[in-house]
Amino acid sequence: MADLRIDLAGIQSPNPFWLASAPPTNTGYQVQRAFEAGWGGAVWKTLGDPIINTSSRFAAVHFNGQRVAGFNNIELITDRPLEVNLKEIYETKKKFPGHAVIASLMVEPKREKWHEIVKRVEDVGVDGLELNFGCPHGMAERGMGAASGQQPDLVQAQTTWVKEVATTPVIVKLTPNITDITVVARHAAKGGADAISLINTINSLAGVDIHSWNTIPHVGGQGAHGGYCGPAVKPIALSMVAECARDRGVGIPISGIGGISTWQDVVEFMLMGATGIQVCTAVMHHGFRIVEEMIDGLNNYLDDKGLASVTELIGKSVPKYSNWGDLDLNYKVVARINEDNCINCNKCHIACEDASHQCIDMLTNADGKAVLQVREEDCVGCNLCSIVCPADGAIDMIALDSGAAPMTWNQRQQVISTLNGSYSEAEVV
Amino acid sequence: MSAFAEFDKERQAVDKLLQQGYGIVNIKEDLDGAEVTFIRSGSDGDPVKLLLLTADARKHVTTAVFAGIRPAAPVEASI
């Protein structure tokens, strides 16, 4: 059995599975039950000046029978006094000394406010701090959360203020509601952050009730934008994690967050540079015990791969992630239809005819049976047919040897530039 | 005409010139495609120009240059 322990910027954890700062980490009761279930760490629901929440806070997007493909919330940070939370953090840490307890913090962007809360929270023995510069709703209207996180200089300044007094590792949690997350990540690093976590939720409106014309959710007929999370956001989160991981100006460990629901998701985030991960929506949907399956799955995967430690996954796919301009234009794949598995639903043909390059023919074979066949010379390898195909194994994407040397767009442009630079019309006129 | 057939027609035109001893000396790309200028090595003849429309042909011609089919030397005699 592989070693699942991680060390995120000095924060030790028995495994990479942490609960994200959210409703599941609102109380000591919840966090302690989560630890009993197997979670290695928990980021406590954000502490700050206690707020007042609305009733009717959550909404979900269900898609084609998949419950909670996406999740939307307008809940704010903790509504409980700091001292109550601190007492429960202390008790939790005492019962579970080997588990990671991180305090998520959000206060006004004032130096003395940060100093005060950091000192009080560290006094009860937390293992680290997570600065919430990501929450997109409610608190942002008051100049906190994402409002801070969208200003790189303010992220840097607040991180610096925290580091002036912090004795535990400081994680800066980033908002995805920004043009380029690496800019903020770099400023967090410049401010002295020991790690970053991403992503927080994405600005969202879950829906509009077409009968009442109310927003979903609504509060007495009035709505406001919320934060979107859950499986639907995973590709966005994974991309942002990867961008930060490959940016040398960031250069600090990453705690990955965003739609993580399975052990496979965890592997993907770690391969793309995360040292550990955080989960919220999947727990809100299925409860704390989903971690059992995640631990088993991850253990089996590591054993199958012959890896002794989960840390061997960290960042292994980052070198495989680059810019479009560095991709090989001469790499070629084509679709190939396996008649044995094809159910002749024609979805590939329709998709190719209507949305791609019209290279799947509907033919009749010698036995009079309808068959679908790809004209490989016209296939551009877009993958669409294999994506829409409902039959496992009916369409394979096959890599062909084009016989041409690898050549990227950037190399191509360089070749043209060099070529044209050594020639002008005047020379031959 | 299939996309491949369009490409193949352009590729054959490019390859024919290369086989005849022409080298690629200039590629001008704009909204209408790529205008490729060929000159026969050591010749003082007029350059030959091909307008390539298909993406695969535009890729083919730069791949040829990239792979080492060097452009013809400038025709000094005509300067």
Image (spheres, rainbow, N blue to C red):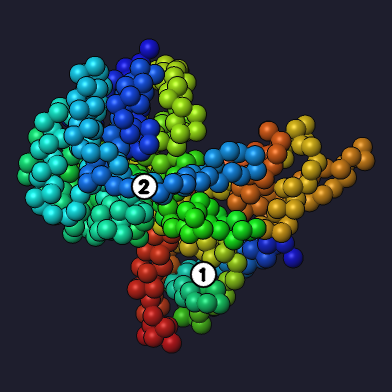
The amino acid type of the residue labelled 1 equals Tyr
Question: Residue B72, relative to residue A340: is it above or below?
Answer: below
Question: Residue A283, relative to residue A205: is it above or below?
Answer: above
The amino acid type of the residue labelled 2 equals Asn
Q: Nearer the viewer, residue A96 or A262?
A: A96
CA distance for labels 2 and 1 = 76 Å
Q: Nearer the viewer, residue A425 or A384?
A: A384
Going by the picture, which residue comes out furthest to the top? A1
- Assess whether mark 1 and mark 2 are in contact (beta carbons under 8 angstroms): no
Is A187 situated left or right of A345 in this image? left
Quadrant where the N terminus of chain A sits is: top left
Is A66 situated left or right of A285 in this image? right
Report whether mark 2 lies on the same chain as mark 1: no
Say the numbered circle drawn on residue A53.
2
Going by the picture, which residue comes out furthest to the right? A368
Q: Which residue is mark 1?
A: B22
Say the numbered circle drawn on residue A363.
none
Name the residue located 68 percent from the left edge and 62 percent from the top edge. B3
In which quarter of the view is residue A37 placed?
top left
For the question of whether residue A98 can be seen, the reply is no
Name the residue located 61 percent from the left edge and 63 percent from the top edge. B11
Name the residue located 25 percent from the left edge and 44 percent from the top edge. A50
Q: Nearer the viewer, residue A268 or B11?
A: A268
Estimate the x, y position of residue A287 in percent, counting from the top left: 46, 27
Estimate the x, y position of residue A89 in percent, counting from the top left: 22, 28
Going by the picture, which residue comes out furthest to the front? A220
